[in-house]
Image (tube, helix red, strand yellow):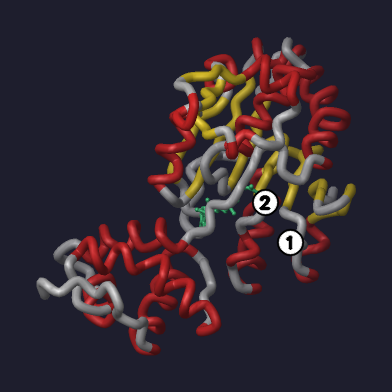
Amino acid sequence: MSGNPGANAKLSPSAFEVIARLAKSESGISLTPAKTTMVQSRLRGRVRALGYADFDQYATFVDSESGGGLEERREMISALTTNVTHFFREPHHFEMLRDKALPILREKARAGGRVRIWSAGCSSGQEPYSIAMTILEHAPDLAQKDVLILASDIDRQILDKAKTGIYSEQQITGIPEPLMKKYLYKSGSGFDQQYEIDPALKKLVRFRELNLLRDWPMTGGFDVVFCRNVVIYFDAPTQAALWPRFRKILAPDAMLFLGHSERISDCAHPLFKSIGLTAYHPAA
Ligand SMILES: C[S@@+](CC[C@H](N)C(=O)[O-])C[C@H]1O[C@@H](n2cnc3c(N)ncnc32)[C@H](O)[C@@H]1O
């Protein structure tokens, strides 16, 4: 290792190729050479932290199967993932959850059934906590039954943040004022002002590390799945391989919500029917 950390090093095409290949195989994230500057800026901190002189040394290290290379791949993926999210993002899905899904799920839970919701690619937690708020606000009795929100992500660091349920003033935009008053506690003051999620919401959410490309340990029967603004970073074949897997873990009348610029690819369309904007039921 060199003692000359690569503060000004440039990402060479060959190092980019290694990083892009690993990003694809480890996480599904597809990086074209047009993303070189982004990759360079997101990974510069890793090159520096490891004391490498340039990205070529870093690429050789992260590509190795031993001596910490495998562990570094996690750090690399964490640095490369885009974690942008906010509370009640794409609000029409929360309206569908409230108006279409929750009335049915209430009945199911009252009859002794399990209710399972999955936020796949949950980032820092705003999505699963928005789901939990919708449940507590519009179907509080459901919260007393067998209901769980699985919130998963590939990025361990962002999950640690999600689990704390602590957000800055800027991060809580999107939460309607009455819900803010009801489900968030202020802590600190001035520039240190923070907001913490009510334990009653946290109780409904289970955070787990899960790579969508690998095996899913869950057996199925999900009533609602939010997988929004995640597959947009995958190429078409990687997306196409996911749709049948989602179909398999959905309960018969379940809902699947995707992000605003995501669509189920044509080849998988017979498996789903559209029920609204980027919202799907499994086809019979
Ligand atoms: C832009 S955020 C979306 C957050 C939230 N779903 C939303 O719509 O606001 C995308 C998330 O997908 C996660 N992600 C990327 N590749 C993944 C994979 N292969 N398996 C699981 N999560 C992944 C990233 O770590 C990131 O937190």
Q: Is residue 153 left or right of residue 60?
A: right
Pick whichever, 42 or 75, lies toward us: 42
Residue 216: x, y in percent?
Answer: 51, 48
Looking at numbered disc 2 in the image, what kind of residue is underneath it?
Arg
Picture quadrant of residue 119:
top right
CB of mark 2 near ligand 1 (< 8 Å): yes
Where residue 118 sits: x, y (%)? 62, 38
- In which quadrant is the N terminus drawn? bottom left
Q: Quick one: 99 or 103, which is closer to the camera?
A: 99
Mark 2 or mark 1, which is nearer the start of the sequence?
A: 2
Residue 210 horizontal/vertical position (percent): 46, 47
**Residue most extreme to the bottom:** 13
**Is there a contact, CB below 8 Å, between mark 1 and mark 2?**
yes
Instruction: Identify the residue at horizontal 26%, vertical 68% (top origin).
Output: 47
Q: Amino acid at mark 1?
A: Glu
Is label 1 within 8 A of ligand 1 (CB to nearest ligand atom)? no
**Number of numbered discs:** 2
Residue 228: image tag = 2
Q: Secondary structure at mark 1?
A: loop
Q: Residues within 10 Å of mark 1 (few under 14, many from 20)?
A: some
Labelled disc at residue 229: none
Q: Relative to residue 209, is residue 277 depicted above or below?
A: below
Residue drawn at 55 percent across, 37 percent down: 125
Asked whether residue 1 is in view, the answer is no
